[in-house]
Amino acid sequence: MTHSKIIAPSLLSANFANLEYDIRQCEDAGVQILHVDVMDGHFVPNITIGPPVVKAIRKVTRLPLDTHLMIEEPDRYLEAFAGAGSTYLTVHYEACRHLHRTVTRIKELGMKPGVSLNPATPIEFLSEILPYCDLVLIMSVNPGFGGQSFIPTSIDKIQNLSAMIRSMNLSTLIEVDGGVTLDNAASVAEAGTDILVAGSAVFAQGTIEASFKELQQAIR
Ligand code: DX5
Ligand code: ZN
């Protein structure tokens, strides 16, 4: 299966006081998927948004919502995010004691399951769960905040994951999150990434449309 590589704007860097406006800008620019960061102040130091905000976003757009849970005990909230309208629901490997059960439940609830790895977690830990995932999210920064610098060793990690997915004859999508900029987007894509998350690179400079299009151009 071939698929084109896409940029997923992370709403973490959008204007929380007027998300609808920023989402409309994304749609007008040709964005195909929105990345939504959920943080609980426990798994990561920061606190962001929860199911009510995802539900509000769902009401103003038909774009797929790629929901990234950076929370402890995600099992407690799977129903809530399904009800809120999440399309992909990604949990952290490091936050799940019974990951297969969690991933299975996400699928049962009608969402596409993703598993995310922190920078220090090796891809080898995915070998058993990979056939059950639609997506693997490689963190290229330590999760918690936008605007951090890309950890360079993530490139090898992406290449190795890409080889692992091919060797298992799977079509699992590879998503990369953290520190993606105009300078490194091409090499991140080249390493085997299908979806590049970009927060500050889309929302923190110039117009959303110009920033998004420039990034999207860089990975074609
Ligand atoms: C970080 C979040 C990211 C964040 C990326 O923990 O998971 O999605 O928005 O922001 P940038 O692209 O600015 O590194
Ligand atoms: Zn994220």
Image (cartoon, rainbow, N blue to C red):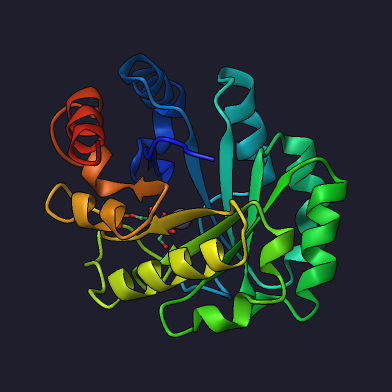
* Relative image position of residue 206 (x, y in whole percent): 13, 31
Rendered view: 20 above or below 202: above
Kindly give the residue lying farthest to the top in the view shown: 28
Q: Is 28 rendered above or below residue 35?
A: above
Q: Nearer the viewer, residue 45 or 125?
A: 125
Picture quadrant of residue 139? bottom left
At 32% from the left and 47% from the top, the residue drawn is 199
| Lateral position of residue 63 relative to residue 25, left or right | right
Residue 24, compared with residue 87, is above or below; it is above
Q: Is residue 160 left or right of residue 80?
A: left
Task: Give the residue drawn at x 25%, y 36%.
Answer: 220
Q: Position of residue 111 (x, y in %)?
A: 74, 43
What residue sits 24% from the left and 67% below the top? 150
Asked whether residue 91 appears in the rendered view, the answer is yes
Q: Nearer the viewer, residue 113 or 84?
A: 113
Residue 212 percent across, percent down from the top left: 25, 32
Report x, y in % for residue 160.
41, 73
Seen at 32% across and 57% down, the residue is 146
Q: Quadrant of the N terminus?
A: top right
